[in-house]
């Protein structure tokens, strides 16, 4: 059934707007309850206001607000600002920034057109439910920080991520065995063997192993600044005495490839190499993949599920276990701070106090 045509005085007016011919003014009838509102004699203003109200009452207001609202009200736009303004002063490690980049891509894919104040607890919870427990907890922590900054700018009233529950993470990866790691090392290229040996004798993380340089060896010490904890503890500033055991590994790192890094390789593709800090530098993800390939080739952990397979990171745990087994102090080797230590990295720090460590673990059994 077609609607009743408007009378002559109201032709050309948007729905719900009417002309009071007797007074020469306009009035608006609210469609939800029929209540009338005076709009005055100005025809253009009355029409503009009526159109805007009609959009709100007829379900198009959210589309208009997205166009009219400031760019930063969009979640993706605020995320851009968070990346460019908030993160840089924190001077986060490269590995942390790479992890954040993965999460940012997930956030943008989940809510590409949402305004930041439209995101609800349920939306965030459903997003987190689609991730593994570890990934969900990482994403949740990052979202809490993002929404905290949005709340500080008055863009949202409550933090939807903070109201979600963290997931319980069950550690599934097993430890390396001496026999297993020895088999992996035998299937590894020379550069990866060097990385494994350095991880065993220094108990350092993947990031710090790949950052070690030949010019870090001076005056009988190998100087290492742990990238993950350098700003939190003076135990992260370590100088390893060049023991005979460490010197043997350092000597194996020298070859005919001109590189400033202890662990290095000649790349297969020159174009990709040109984008790196140095053409011989090995990226963390490449090391992880190469280690997995060697582990699969070694077939040393038959019967273990994929999620149980130890990676390169677990070499550090084996190293600390072997130091303890040999009756040696693994705390200084690992760079674990004690409660009495004061922070070494300050804005106006004058001098770095290096924590001395003696890397004298016998790892000859791995190179049989």
Image: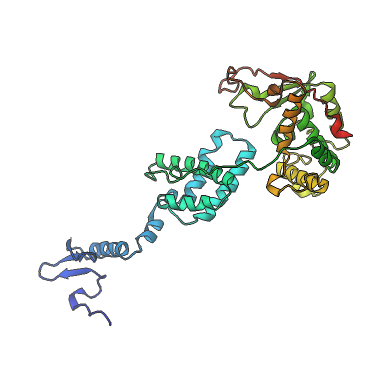
Is residue 264 among the parts visible in the rendering?
A: no
Q: Residue extending furthest front? A: 303
Q: How many marks?
A: 0
| 92 to the left or right of 76 | right
Q: Quadrant of the C terminus?
A: top right
Q: Residue extending furthest bottom? A: 1
Which residue is located at x 60 percent, y 42 percent? 170
| 12 to the left or right of 208 | left
Is residue 329 among the parts visible in the rendering?
A: yes
| 312 to the left or right of 124 | right
Which residue is located at x 59 percent, y 35 percent? 92
Q: 176 or 84, which is in the foreground? A: 176
Q: 51 or 342, which is in the foreground? A: 342
Q: Quadrant of residue 152?
A: top left
Q: 193 or 223, which is in the foreground? A: 193
Q: Quadrant of the N terminus?
A: bottom left
Seen in the picture, residue 250 relative to 157 is either above or below; the reply is above
Q: Position of residue 257 (x, y in %)?
A: 85, 38
Q: Position of residue 149 (x, y in %)?
A: 45, 40
Snapshot colouring:
rainbow
Q: Position of residue 168 (x, y in %)?
A: 55, 42
Q: Residue extending furthest left? A: 22
Seen in the picture, residue 211 relative to 295 is either above or below; the reply is above
Which residue is located at x 44 percent, y 40 percent? 148
Q: 298 or 92, which is in the foreground? A: 298
Q: Position of residue 180 (x, y in %)?
A: 80, 40
Which residue is located at x 43 percent, y 46 percent? 160
């Amino acid at each position: 059934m077609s609607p009743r045509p408007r009378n002559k005085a109201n032709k050309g007016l948007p729905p719900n707007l009417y002309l009071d011919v007797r007074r020469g003014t306009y009035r608006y009838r609210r469609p939800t309850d029929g209540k009338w509102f005076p709009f005055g004699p100005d025809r253009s203003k009355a029409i503009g206001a009526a159109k805007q109200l009609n959009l709100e009452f007829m379900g198009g207001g959210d589309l208009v607000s997205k166009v009219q609202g400031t760019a930063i009200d969009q979640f993706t736009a605020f995320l851009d600002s968070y990346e460019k303004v908030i993160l840089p002063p924190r001077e986060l490690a490269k590995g942390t920034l790479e992890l954040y980049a993965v999460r940012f891509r997930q956030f943008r894919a989940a809510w590409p057109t949402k305004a930041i104040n439209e995101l609800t607890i349920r939306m965030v919870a459903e997003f987190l439910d689609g991730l593994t427990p570890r990934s969900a907890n990482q994403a949740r922590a990052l979202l809490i920080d993002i929404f905290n900054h949005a709340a500080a700018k008055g863009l949202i009233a409550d933090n939807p991520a903070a109201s979600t529950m963290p997931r319980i993470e069950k550690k599934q990866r097993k430890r390396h065995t001496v026999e297993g790691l020895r088999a992996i090392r035998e299937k590894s290229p020379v550069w990866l063997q060097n990385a494994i040996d350095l991880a065993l004798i220094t108990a350092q993380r993947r990031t710090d192993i790949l950052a070690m340089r030949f010019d870090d060896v001076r005056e009988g010490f190998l100087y290492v600044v742990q990238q993950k904890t350098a700003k939190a503890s003076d135990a992260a500033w370590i100088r390893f005495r060049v023991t005979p055991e460490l010197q043997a590994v350092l000597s194996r790192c020298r070859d005919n490839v001109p590189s400033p890094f202890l662990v290095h390789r000649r790349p297969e593709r020159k174009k990709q190499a040109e984008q790196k800090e140095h053409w011989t530098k090995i990226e963390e993800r490449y090391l992880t993949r190469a280690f997995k390939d060697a582990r699969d080739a070694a077939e040393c952990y038959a019967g273990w599920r994929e999620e149980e397979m130890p990676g390169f990171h677990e070499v550090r745990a084996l190293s600390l276990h072997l130091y303890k087994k040999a009756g040696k102090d693994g705390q200084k080797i690992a760079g674990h701070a004690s409660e009495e230590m004061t922070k070494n990295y300050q804005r106006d720090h004058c001098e770095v106090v290096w924590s001395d460590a003696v890397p004298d673990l016998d790892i000859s059994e791995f190179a049989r």
